[in-house]
């Protein structure tokens, strides 16, 4: 545990490591690595922010998908990149605050410096139409009558979608099996065909709006305008607020980046997060714009790491 604590604490100071200033940053294209496949939530958030950040920086922002190892392939690539601000990582909670402290990874989270929190995913629980149930209470009744028969999909072992499934099924008093995917987009066909039965990723909102899957509930303070007939978790008696507040997407770079580069990127991203156009586009993909500057975000990550380490032990979740 001391090793874990030291590694996580290093995150807080990674962005502030001394390095030569870069007054003319950027003077070439900037790359944002997404450690998952195209079309998922991380990809959507990266491209929406890149679209707004490019004209502000005056350089092209290239979004590059590098899926694999539950986000580990992309994280390792950025952690090993030169700390000049030109290779960045768009990552969710799991890559920094869950996976590294519950199982061995190919990357060290201390090699990644927080730049800014970008968004909070809105949890939309979606169910295959093949079961023929129309409400969450109907599904709970069905699942209780058939413990272990139904499957939920996630974007990989130890990801936030995996833990969401564990927390939600425990709160509902049901037993489901877990089907991890390399990327959540790979689960689309299986959900529609009924091979698996439930997913929690906000990138399924378009399918829910089109009626291709059924939205069961939304874990937000109010119903979503795009699916107004879908109740909130609170309405259904499910308390998920403390857990969901720790789900985020953020931008990172290699540790040791120049302080002025980190602060400029953090500041510009904060301004972008306040623009109504970006906020509306994020809501269309079930994301809420939420900015934290690099220092506050680093403290958030340390707190989240402790929370999820304890949660995994409490749930006795297998991550191998």
Image: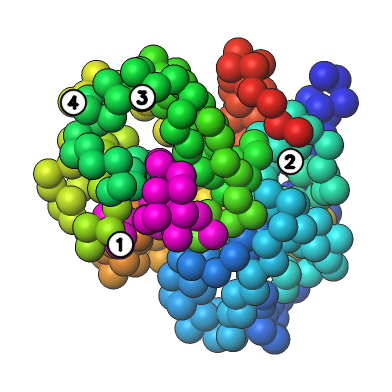
- Answer whether labels 1 and 3 touch (C-beta < 8 Å): no
Residue 235 — which label?
4
Percent coordinates x, y for residue 300 in the rendering: 57, 35
| Residue located 73% across and 70% down the image | 87
**Label 3: how many Cα within 10 Å (few below 14, some 14–19, many 20+):** some
Q: Is residue 105 left or right of residue 153?
A: right
Residue annotated with mark 3: 143
Percent coordinates x, y for residue 269 in the rendering: 49, 63
Up-down relation of residue 153 to residue 38 (above or below): above
SS of the residue at dot 4? loop
Percent coordinates x, y for residue 215 in the rendering: 26, 45
Q: Which residues are magenta?
A: 186-208
Label 4, label 3: how far apart the Cα atoms are: 20 Å
**Label 1: how many Cα within 10 Å (few below 14, some 14–19, many 20+):** some
Residue 119 in view of the camera: no
Of the numbered discs 4 and 3, the one sitting upstream in the chain is 3
Residue annotated with mark 2: 11
Residue annotated with mark 1: 206
């Amino acid at each position: 545990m001391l090793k874990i604590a030291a590694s996580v604490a290093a995150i807080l100071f990674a962005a502030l490591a001394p390095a030569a200033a870069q007054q003319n940053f950027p003077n070439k294209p900037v790359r944002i690595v997404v450690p998952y496949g195209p079309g998922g939530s991380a990809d959507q958030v990266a491209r929406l922010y890149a679209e707004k950040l490019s004209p502000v920086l005056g350089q092209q922002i290239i979004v590059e998908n590098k899926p694999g190892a539950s986000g580990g392939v992309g994280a390792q690539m950025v952690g090993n990149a030169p700390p000049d601000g030109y290779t960045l990582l768009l990552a969710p909670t799991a890559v920094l605050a869950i996976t590294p402290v519950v199982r061995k990874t190919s990357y060290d989270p201390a090699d990644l410096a927080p730049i800014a929190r970008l968004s909070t995913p809105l949890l939309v629980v979606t169910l295959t139409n093949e079961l023929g149930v129309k409400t969450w209470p109907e599904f709970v009744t069905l699942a209780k009558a058939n413990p272990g028969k139904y499957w939920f999909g996630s974007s990989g072992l130890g990801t936030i979608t995996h833990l969401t499934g564990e927390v939600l099924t425990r709160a509902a008093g049901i037993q489901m099996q877990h089907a991890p995917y390399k990327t959540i987009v790979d689960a689309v066909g299986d959900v529609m065909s009924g091979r698996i039965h439930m997913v929690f990723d906000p990138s399924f909102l378009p399918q829910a709006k089109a009626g291709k899957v059924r939205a069961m509930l939304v874990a937000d303070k109010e119903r979503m305008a795009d699916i107004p007939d879908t109740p909130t978790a609170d309405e259904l008696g499910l308390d998920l607020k403390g857990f969901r507040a720790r789900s985020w997407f953020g931008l990172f770079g290699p540790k040791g980046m120049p302080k002025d580069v980190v602060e400029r990127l953090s500041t510009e991203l904060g301004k972008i997060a306040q623009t109504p156009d970006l906020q509306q586009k994020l809501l269309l993909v079930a994301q809420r714009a939420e900015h934290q500057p690099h220092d506050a975000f680093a403290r958030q990550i340390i707190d989240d790491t402790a929370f999820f380490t304890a949660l995994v032990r409490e749930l006795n979740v297998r991550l191998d």
